[in-house]
Amino acid sequence: MPTTTIAGHDVTVDDEGFMTVYDEWDEVTAKALAEAIGVDMTDEHWAVIRFLRDDFKAQGTTPTIRRVSTAGGVDTKRLFQLFPKKPAKKMAYIAGLPKPAGCV
Amino acid sequence: MTATQDLIVPSFDDEVETDRTLAIICSKGSLDMAYPGLILGNAALGEGVNVHLFFTFWGFDIITKGRMEHLKFSPVGNPAAHIPAALAPVPGMTSMATHMMHKSLDDLEIPEVPEFLEIIKASGAHVWACKLSADMNHLSEGDLWDGVDGIINATEFIEMTDGAQLLFI
């Protein structure tokens, strides 16, 4: 696993750049990750990212778009606006989590 | 292997204005055959691919109000259902098999067909109804699910999906 420096922290990432160690993440890191993929974080973005973090901690897997929508309360259309084109992957990337494994 | 290196940023292909389009023709109306198109279409939308779905022949039930919530799964003629062939046509079997399939899908948190259509529509899918199927079934737009973009003929669908990758289900 490569390590990389994000916002002054050494973090472990996979070959694509997704963080692999849950506790290496913090909000400063998240902001840097978001900037790297062109997402300008607003309160609405933060609410989604915090939901992903909490849900991963509780469930052990990265929530899918449907779960963010049903359990996290942000509808699908809005997620596509906040994280354009590939919301599931972009949300996971910023939240420092693996890509979601679920199909739906 | 450990190596410290510059920030690795996944390629989300944002710089590329993708023209990848997937055309999915849904021609079957049983519960089990409704899902492949919805799941693959949903996956493609999540990857930033343009998706057009064309509902035709038996697949028309998937977008017909009053039918879309009552799609059935029958084990008859389907060896992969793993029910002895002699038992498959027994009265009540379709209802039992349908019930079991709903349960399996629900256990995996796969949405029911109407909710699934809402999801792919919210994700940007284009949903088309086949004109010939509408005529055969004596149905018009008012009879169809509200998310249907229009009733079009096969030629229009082929024109609209010029250059697309195509799935026939």
Image (spheres, rainbow, N blue to C red):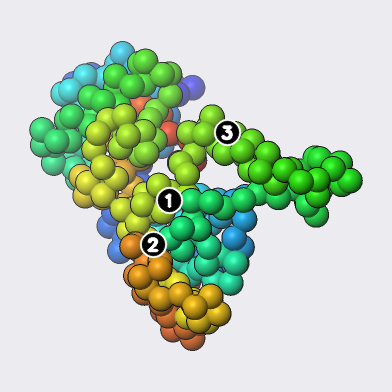
Name the residue carrying label 3.
B103
Q: Is residue B132 left or right of residue A6?
A: right
> Where residue B85 sits in the image (x, y, percent)?
87, 47
Residues at circles 2 and 3 in contact by the CB criterion of under 8 Å: no
- Label 1, on which residue? B114
Pointer 1 or 3: first along the chain: 3
Q: How far apart are marks 1 and 3 (CA)?
A: 16 Å
Q: Is residue A8 above or below residue B9?
A: above
Q: In this view, does B164 lie to the left or right of B29?
A: left
Are labels 2 and 3 assigned to the same chain? Answer: yes
Could you tell me which chain the residue with mark 2 belongs to?
B
Are dots 2 and 1 on a single chain?
A: yes
Q: Residues within 10 Å of mark 1 (few under 14, many from 20)?
A: some
Q: Residue at 55% across / 80% down in the picture?
A: B136
C-alpha distance separating marks 2 and 3: 24 Å
- Helix, strand or loop for disc 3: helix
On the same chain, marks 1 and 3? The answer is yes
Specify whether A73 is left or right of B129: left
Q: Which amino acid does label 3 sit on?
A: Lys
Mark 3: few/some/many CA within 10 Å (<14, 14-19, 20+): few
The residue closer to the viewer here, B70 or A20, is: B70
CB-based contact (under 8 Å), mark 2 and mark 1: yes
Residue in the foreground of this view, choosing between A7 and A86: A86
Instruction: Give whichever of discs 2 and 1 has the lower sequence position.
Output: 1
Q: Identify the mark at residue B145; answer none if there is no mark.
A: 2
What kind of residue is marked 2?
Answer: Trp
| Local secondary structure at mark 1 | helix
Pointer 2 local density, CA inside 10 Å: few below 14, some 14–19, many at least 20: many
Image quadrant containing the N terminus of chain A: top left
Q: Is mark 2 on a helix, strand or loop?
A: loop
Please state which amino acid type lies under the numbered disc 1: Pro
Residue A79 image-quadrant placement: top left
